[in-house]
Every structure is written in C-alpha cells, then in structure tokens.
Image: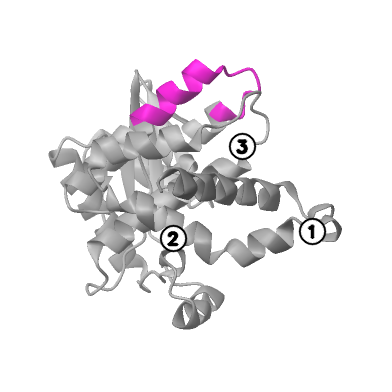
Amino acid sequence: MSSIEIIAKKEFDSSRSDIFPFIFENKAYWLKKARATKPDRIQDFFYKFLPFELLIPPLKKNKKEALDFEVSKLEKFYSLGINVPKVVVKNSDYFVLEDSGKSVNRIFKNKNIIEKDFYFYIDLALFELAKIHNCNSFHGGSQLRNFTFKDGKVFAIDFEESFQDNVDIKKLQYRDFLLFLLSFLKLKKLNFKIDYERIINKYLELSSNFEFKNKLIIFSKRLRFFSWLYEKDFIKKRVGSDVKYFFELIEILNKMGKNAK
C-alpha cells in the first residue's frame, strides 16, 4: 500500500462527510465515498406524462455500481484529453482525485466579477462540455457547480448519473446543455445582464449540435402559456427570483425564435 493510500484510508475512517479534501505532501486531494444513486420519485412520475429531457430519470445504482461508473468515466475522459481531475486512488469504498481548484459557481458569487472575466470562464466551461459531447458522450450533471478552475483551466467533475442504454445520446447532450443554461438562474449578484444568445451560439460553434437551437426555441414555445400566466401582476409580484430569471430565459429564447423567422 502506497503512502497516499495509507493517508486516504485514515481520512476515510475518520470523516463522516461523503466528499472532502485532504492534504498529502503539501498537495490537495479530494476523497469521495461510494454512495448509491437513485431517481427522484416525483421526477420519475412526471417523466411518464411529460417527457421533457430535463426529467429523464437517472438509473438506480448501488454504492459499488455508482463508484465503478464514475471512476471509469473519469478515467475515460482523462485518457481522451478532457479536463477532469486524475484518479489517484480507487477501491470499493472510495476514490481519491487530484484537486481541480475552485468551483466556477463560487467564483461567480463574487459580486465584483466583470463581464469580460465572466465569459472567460464560461467559454472554458463550454469548451470542456463540447469536448465531452464531441466524444459522443454526456456529462449528466452539467450545472456550473460541477465545473472548477485551476491553473488557467476549467475542469469537469461529478459524473454519478447514468441512464438507460436506449436513451438517445443527443437527448442526454441536450439535457446537459439545458442544465448548464438553467444553472445561470441562481447567479443573483452579477452587475451585468447575461447574454444567453452569446452562450448558446458559442456552444453550437464548439459542438456543431446546431439542431439544439431549434429545440430550445420549441422548448420555450411549449411553456408559452406559463409565460403568459407569469406576466399577470398578481403572480409576478409573488414569485421568487429563481422563477423570475427562468422566465427571463424563456423570453430570450422566444425572441431568438422570432429573429430566426
């Protein structure tokens, strides 16, 4: 057993957290314990009646299956040149990753971030997401919180979710991109307006998934009734900021649809 494996085992035995950092020889690492995954029952129920890509339920996996799946995906992506943290220790109870820096989402919580820097990080994240998609694969949890930044690079993390083999890969990639866009709705301290059309066009340029633009427009049209309802004063005054930002995105997608005609 190597020195880092000995330290990792001690950390595993002493910590109650599922995911946590530790230091070995002045270098940071992250330990992630094996944990089962299962679909949300409500999500599973609604997907039977509303087959939106966002509602596709992930597979149920026991601890070992979940750990093996995530480790194999990390190792595959690493071998393909996708920026993911390197797996340095793995066994049936946990795996250890090299540190990949600070969460992009956490960086964006700095209210003083300027627009130029914002798109610097976004473009790097989009580049990694597109690399994953261009390898005929998917992320599964592509929210901003699952991208990190270190040494001038953005890394993708957290690959727990898997899906039925018969689910079309393009559906899962489209789901990834929707999750990515919707994760912007929680950014409340920016002092500039997010240019969603710029982000969408950058992703299309990198991935060549040009059909996604039309799918986004169709997605916004399917929610037109709810957008109309949202505009009613008695509702608009009572909803939270997350709902407000969501419908702002829907309105932007609607305008994109009108401009495309």
Q: Which residues, given as a range, are shown in magenta? A: 108-124
Q: Main secondary structure of the magenta part?
A: helix
Q: Secondary structure at mark 2?
A: helix
Which class describes the residues within 10 Å of circle 3: few (<14), some (14-19), or many (20+)? some
Q: Secondary structure at mark 3?
A: loop
Q: Is residue 15 visible?
A: no
The circle on residue 25 is none
Residue 43 in picture, x, y percent from top left: 51, 73
Queried whether the magenta region covers residue 133, the answer comes back as no
Outermost residue to the front: 261
Q: Secondary structure at mark 1?
A: loop
The circle on residue 232 is 1
Query: Where 195 falls versus 36 (above or below)?
Result: above
Mark 1 or 3, nearer chain start: 3
Q: Which residue is mark 2?
A: 218
Mark 2 or 3, nearer chain start: 3
Q: Depth check: 79 or 27 in front? A: 79
Mark nearest the camera among 1 and 3 is 1
Residue 63 in picture, x, y percent from top left: 36, 67
Mark 1 or 2, nearer chain start: 2
Q: Depth check: 215 or 105 in front? A: 215
Q: Quadrant of the N terminus?
A: top left
In this rendering, position of residue 195 left or right of residue 163: right
What residue is at 13 percent from the left and 40 percent from the top? Answer: 79
In this rendering, position of residue 171 left or right of residue 122: left
Q: Depth check: 61 or 50 in front? A: 50
Q: Is residue 18 visible?
A: yes
Using the numbered discs, state the Cα–Cα distance from disc 1 to disc 3 in whole angstroms: 24 Å
Q: Which residue is mark 3?
A: 187
Query: Where 153 falls versus 10 (above or below)?
Result: above
Mark 1 in CB contact with mark 2 (< 8 angstroms): no
